[in-house]
Image (cartoon, rainbow, N blue to C red):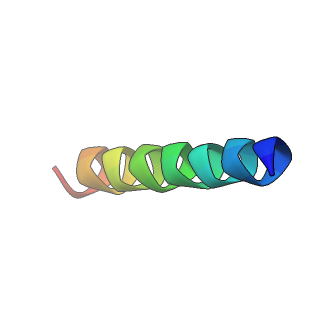
């Protein structure tokens, strides 16, 4: 259970990083 929670957080971080990256490329 703890492992899946970590994976969830990691995916969330990846998503945020992706959004940040696309924001910088668009600007």
- Residue at left offset 73%, top offset 50%: 7
Vertically, is 11 above or below 24? below
From the viewer's perspective, is 19 left or right of 12? left
Quadrant of res 8: bottom right
Which residue shows up at 16% across the image and 49% down it? Answer: 27
Q: Nearer the viewer, residue 27 or 9?
A: 9
Give residue 15's position: percent from left, percent from top: 48, 56
Residue that appears at 46% across and 43% down: 17
Q: How many discs mark residues in the rendered view?
A: 0
Of 16 and 2, the residue lying toward us: 2
- Give the image quarter of residue 24: top left
Image coordinates for residue 19, horizontal then vertical, percent: 35, 55
| Viewer-proximal residue among 1 and 19 | 1
Figure check: 3 above or below 8: above
In percent of width and height, residue 14 lies at 56, 49
- In front of the other: 21 or 2: 2
Asked whether, in this view, residue 2 is left or right of residue 27, the answer is: right
Residue 15 as seen in the image, left or right of residue 20:
right
Residue furthest out toward the left: 27
**Residue 11 position within the rendered picture, expressed as x and y whole percent measured from the top left:** 61, 54
């Amino acid at each position: 259970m703890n492992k899946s929670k970590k994976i969830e957080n990691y995916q969330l971080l990846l998503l945020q990083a992706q959004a940040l990256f696309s924001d910088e490329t668009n600007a």
